[in-house]
Amino acid sequence: MQLAGCLTDVPGVRVGHARRVSRGWATGTTVVLLPQGTVGGIDVRGGGPGTRETDVLHPSATVSEVHAICLTGGSAYGLAAATGVMEYLESRGVGFRVGPEPHAVVPIVPAAVIFDLGRGGRFDNRPDAGFGRRAASAARNHPTPNGAIGAGTGARAHGLQGGVGSASKLVAHETWADGIVVSALAVVNAAGSVIDRDTGLPWMPGDVRLRRPSNADRSVLQAQLDGATPALNTTIGVVATTANLTKAECSRVATVAHDGLARAIRPVHSMLDGDTIFAVATGRDELPHDRARNTMLNAILAAAADCFAIACTNAIVSAESTSGSLAYRDLCPSAFTADGV
């Protein structure tokens, strides 16, 4: 099975972005629409998270199915974008059924935000329900690019332009010839740095081929990183898999995905971050119910950490400046090989 390195490598998962960059705007929303029967979990590690509908993901909560995940800018104000996603799904009869009528549904749309207020010039320009509706309407099952798009439009990462990145891997399984797919999408808006100031390269290699930047480029990069001031930041994202997991197992996937976050961004989980990772399982691939299950789960957990780390790196090295912050590409053009992206 050939993977494109995107969250949509998990069949049935669709991703859509909406953003606005002009006249005081630099923000956006990313929506992940999920196939019927998808189970979800979550792990929040940052000291300043902004979330919505996350308690429903606890293993003891009644509802198991998740219909969409909303990732958005706008800090706590941006949580309004999730209302637009709910309205989009309601209009299509998608949600937790609460009555006999076709429209009697309540879509389950957990959400998390990054802080990007004022980065386009105006503090009051932030995502609302319209952003959520547009992102949901734009959701497709084909690959989407990395960079300063969707929820990553106004993102920053320790003085550099932030963005959205994705990655995927296959976990071998004797029952499934194509293997179990594990994929990740990260919105990187971190207080810590993805880049090692001494080498000028990411802490964690990504999918873009890079070479050690020139001495001149490293000096410019070091000055930019050294001059970065602490801000209200967050890295949020989603890990998806084709495995059939319980809510508790999904939450464990989210927990271990934070290990990948810690590999790619240093430091993480500070009081200035709201680091939040969702994990969703579509249930296509059944796992064994004997002791071999834990072996498979461990392989999925390892892949989740790898994918999230790579996704974080891909976000930064692919981003182009949109919110006044210089991008890694601007500061270290010598790092990109002739056949780089």
Image (cartoon, grey):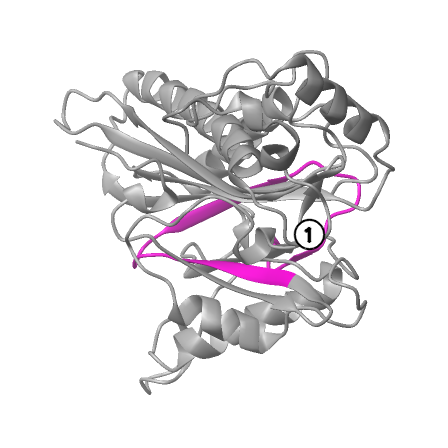
| Residue at x-position 60% and y-position 54% | 153
The answer to which quarter of the image holds residue 66 is: bottom left
Relative to the observer, which residue lies in front, 323 or 219? 219
**Label 1 CA crowd tier, 10 Å (few <14, some 14–19, many 20+):** many
Relative to the observer, which residue lies in front, 327 or 98? 327
183 relative to 2 in the view: left or right:
right
| Residue at x-position 62% and y-position 33% | 328
Image quadrant containing the C terminus: top left
Relative to the observer, which residue lies in front, 313 or 287? 313
| Residue at x-position 23% and y-position 20% | 172
Tell me if residue 17 comes above or below residue 283 in the rendering: below
Query: Residue 310: x, y in percent?
Result: 48, 27
Amino acid type at mark 1: Ile
Residue 95 can be seen in this image: no
Image quadrant containing the N terminus: top left
17 relative to 128 in the view: left or right:
left
Magenta stretch in the rendered image: 27-55
Tell me if residue 211 comes above or below residue 319 in the rendering: above
Tell me if residue 210 comes above or below residue 186 in the rendering: above
| Residue at x-position 66% and y-position 26% | 265
> For the image shown, how many numbered marks are present on the structure?
1
Q: Is residue 277 magenta?
A: no
Q: Is residue 54 magenta?
A: yes
Residue 338 can be seen in this image: yes
The answer to which quarter of the image holds residue 220 is: top right
Query: Residue 183: x, y in percent?
Result: 38, 36
104 relative to 187 in the view: left or right:
left
Query: Residue 92: x, y in percent?
Result: 33, 78
Relative to the observer, which residue lies in front, 333 or 179? 333
Which residue is identified by label 1?
A: 114
The secondary structure type at the circle numbered 1 is loop
